[in-house]
Amino acid sequence: MVIPIGTFVKFFEEMTREDIQEAGGKAANLGELTQAGFNVPPGFCVLADSLHHHLEKNDLQPKINGIVAGFDYEDYAIIEGKTNEIRDLIISAPIPADLLRELTDSIDKLTGPDQVFVAVRSSVAVKGLPISSFPGMMDTF
């Protein structure tokens, strides 16, 4: 299956509030501000389908389902431990080559000899839910 360029990443100038489900509220609003001419630092959003692609390419969903089957929703410590297991599975799996290429190409467009650093911020996208903001729930690097 050939995946078209732009499947996993969208630059702010390409985004509108219509992208909230795929990009999250913060990223979609940065797109709106960029298009309106506000002085927004250049950037892009890694779209929600990137995670699904990562899970599929690494066959992680059956493992995740197995961990979730062992949840005891009455015990916070168990939930925290199990979600850490899921996070570790996702983090330790190799990034699929097509996704990595698109991420690398997008970072290369933002950087150069005078600009070698980028900031990574969260923008939660939850398909099918009206909620698009989870303040304080994610990290910035």
Image (cartoon, rainbow, N blue to C red):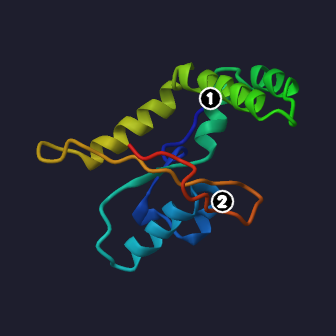
Tell me the residue at 61%/62% (across/down).
Answer: 133
Left or right side of 16 for 20: right
- For image coordinates 60% across by 23% down, the residue present is 88
Q: Position of residue 13 (x, y in %)?
A: 40, 65
Q: Residues within 10 Å of mark 2 (few under 14, many from 20)?
A: many
To which residue does mark 2 refer? Answer: 21
Query: Where's the C terminus, which quadrant?
Result: top left
In the picture as drawn, the residue positioned furthest to the bottom comes out as 36
Relative to 19, residue 111 above or below? above
Reply above or below: 33 against 67.
below
Q: Residue at x 67, y 22 (%)?
A: 85
Quadrant (top left/top right/bottom left/bottom right) for the N terminus: top right
Q: Quadrant of residue 91?
A: top right
Q: Nearer the viewer, residue 108 or 87?
A: 87
**Crowd rating for badge 1 (residues with CA inside 10 Å; few <14, some 14–19, many 20+):** few
The disc placed on residue 87 is: 1
Looking at this view, is 33 or 85 the one in front? 85
Q: Percent x, y for residue 100?
A: 45, 31
How far from the left and from the top, in percent, is residue 12?
Answer: 42, 62
Q: Amino acid at mark 1?
A: Arg
Mark found first going from the N terminus, 1 or 2: 2
The quarter of the displayed image where residue 53 is located: top right
Residue 5 shown left or right of residue 81 in the figure: left
Distance between mark 1 and mark 2 Cα atoms: 22 Å
Amino acid carrying mark 2 in the image: Gln
Between residues 2 and 37, which one lies in front from this camera angle?
37
Q: Residue, x 42% and y 47% (percent of image)?
A: 140
* Secondary structure at numbered mark 2: helix
Q: Position of residue 47 (x, y in %)?
A: 56, 48
